[in-house]
């Protein structure tokens, strides 16, 4: 079973060795910048690479401001705090996501509310969101209230799954109409655009991740994107222990977080960012090869949604049913080709079992069928 698929993937990656799902690629200025960083002695949260990285991220994505953080989860946490998420609030998100999205909501002592995804984008469905808002919510004093739970719905966090942009403009219009803050989880979609605009720049704030498995990595790292100068200043302030700038005095004007990206990680990232366009092209080329092969084989390969240009961070297949999915996972992993199922849906995890759920038809359907296949950049 799936012998031709395994053979095709081996040929695509030109190796008989184990093929991981996504490995980082370091062949540019990474070592040089790391050495420069070490020689400067500024290895921690102050340094020129962090500042350079922020400027380059802003210019790459077209966001007015980029604030570097220690990881993507921290970027989400700070974004939600700046969206004024209060203890006891509700935050709408999708059940088909990595746990970090919901962890960040929990750090604010808020509850996730799960709304379905679209089956083509695998990201939050504007149609499902609209149905949920119309059925359960009212706007009072410029605040959205869930009449069923009697809680405030403060924010909405859609996620661009595997790098494929969701219908973010329609989601934004709904959030605006209901006075809900839009925070994009763009952790997986650096390099992806929707209607020509970079993901992560549609909402009040957007969060990007540079974990080791993402399209570019600093070993770890994250970034907040925003077009709002006040929010950008606040993001930098509370992610750097809320220290009041002064030459020698140590004064802090609120509870802050030690969430600043270390300069060492930023050194790696400045080098990685220089290669990002090349990585996106390379990954899109692999996706085209996959698409041709799987179409010929009668298998369903996930392609970029309409109106978007995807970074194809993780390639995905949709198997006919759970049994076929399990056979696929068995056969490929047994032959040294790493594949994995999509995440267990968030509302099934013990800590989110009590969270409110809208109907989750598409997410449930996808959960038992979607697998990710090797997607690393193929460059010497
Ligand atoms: C990777 C990821 C994150 C978190 O990023 P970290 O840098 O690992 O904290 C958040 N959301 C999604 C959807 C992710 O894939």
Image: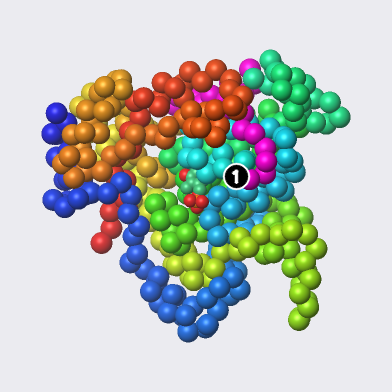
Q: Which x, y percent locates residue 335?
A: 16, 41
Which residue shows up at 17% across the image and 39% down it? 334
Q: Does the beta carbon of the residue at mark 1 sit less than 8 Å from ligand 1? A: yes
Residue 279 versus residue 175: which sits nearer the camera? 175
Q: Which x, y percent locates residue 272?
A: 43, 63
In the rendered structure, the answer to whether residue 149 lies left or right of residue 37 reads right
Q: For the magenta stretch, what is the residue range?
A: 107-131
In the rendered structure, the answer to whether residue 286 lies left or right of residue 121 reads left
Q: Quadrant of the C terminus?
A: bottom left
> Of all residues shown, which one is farthest toward the right?
141
Q: Which residue is mark 1?
A: 104
Within-10-Å neighbours for mark 1: few <14, some 14–19, many 20+:
many
Which residue shows up at 36% across the image and 25% down it? 368
Q: Give yes or no for residue 278 being in the magenta stretch.
A: no
Q: Give yes or no for residue 114 being in the magenta stretch.
A: yes
In the rendered structure, the answer to whether residue 172 lies left or right of residue 335 reads right
Q: Which x, y percent locates residue 317?
A: 32, 31
Residue 151 versus residue 155: which sits nearer the camera? 151
In the rendered structure, the answer to whether residue 315 lies left or right of residue 91 reads left
**Which structural element holds mark 1?**
helix
């Amino acid at each position: 079973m799936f012998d031709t698929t395994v053979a095709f993937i081996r040929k695509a990656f030109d190796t008989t060795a184990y093929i991981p799902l996504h490995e980082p690629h370091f062949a540019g200025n990474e070592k040089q910048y790391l050495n420069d960083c070490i020689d400067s002695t500024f290895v921690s949260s102050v340094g020129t690479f962090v500042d350079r990285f922020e400027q380059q991220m802003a210019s790459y994505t077209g966001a007015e401001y980029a604030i570097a953080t220690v990881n993507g989860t921290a970027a989400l946490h700070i974004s939600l705090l700046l969206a004024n998420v209060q203890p006891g609030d509700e935050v709408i998100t999708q059940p088909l996501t990595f746990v970090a999205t919901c962890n960040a909501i929990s750090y604010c002592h808020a509850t996730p509310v799960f709304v379905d995804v679209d089956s083509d984008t695998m990201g939050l469905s504007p149609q499902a969101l609209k149905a949920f808002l119309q059925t359960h919510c009212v706007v009072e004093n410029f605040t959205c209230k869930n009449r069923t739970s009697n809680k405030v719905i403060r924010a909405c966090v859609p996620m661009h799954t595997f790098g494929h942009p969701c219908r973010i403009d329609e989601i934004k219009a709904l959030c605006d109409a209901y006075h809900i803050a839009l925070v994009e989880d763009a952790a997986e979609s650096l390099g992806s655009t929707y209607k020509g605009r970079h993901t992560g720049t549609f909402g009040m704030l957007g969060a990007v991740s540079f974990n080791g498995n993402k399209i570019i990595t600093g070993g770890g790292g994250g970034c907040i994107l925003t077009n709002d100068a006040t929010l950008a200043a606040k993001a930098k302030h509370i992610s750097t222990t809320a220290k009041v700038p002064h030459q020698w005095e140590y004064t802090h004007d609120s509870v802050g977080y030690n969430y600043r990206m270390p300069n060492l990680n930023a050194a790696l990232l400045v080098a990685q960012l220089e290669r990002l366009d090349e990585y996106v092209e390379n990954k899109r080329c692999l996706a085209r090869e996959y698409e041709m092969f799987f179409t010929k084989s009668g298998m369903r390969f996930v392609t970029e949604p309409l109106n978007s240009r995807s970074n194809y961070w993780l390639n995905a297949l949709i198997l006919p049913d759970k049994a076929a999915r399990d056979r696929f996972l068995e056969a490929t992993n047994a032959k040294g080709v790493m594949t994995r199922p999509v995440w267990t849906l968030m509302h099934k995890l013990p800590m989110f079992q009590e969270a409110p759920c809208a109907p989750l038809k598409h997410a449930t359907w996808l959960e038992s069928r979607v697998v990710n296949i090797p997607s690393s950049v193929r460059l010497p």
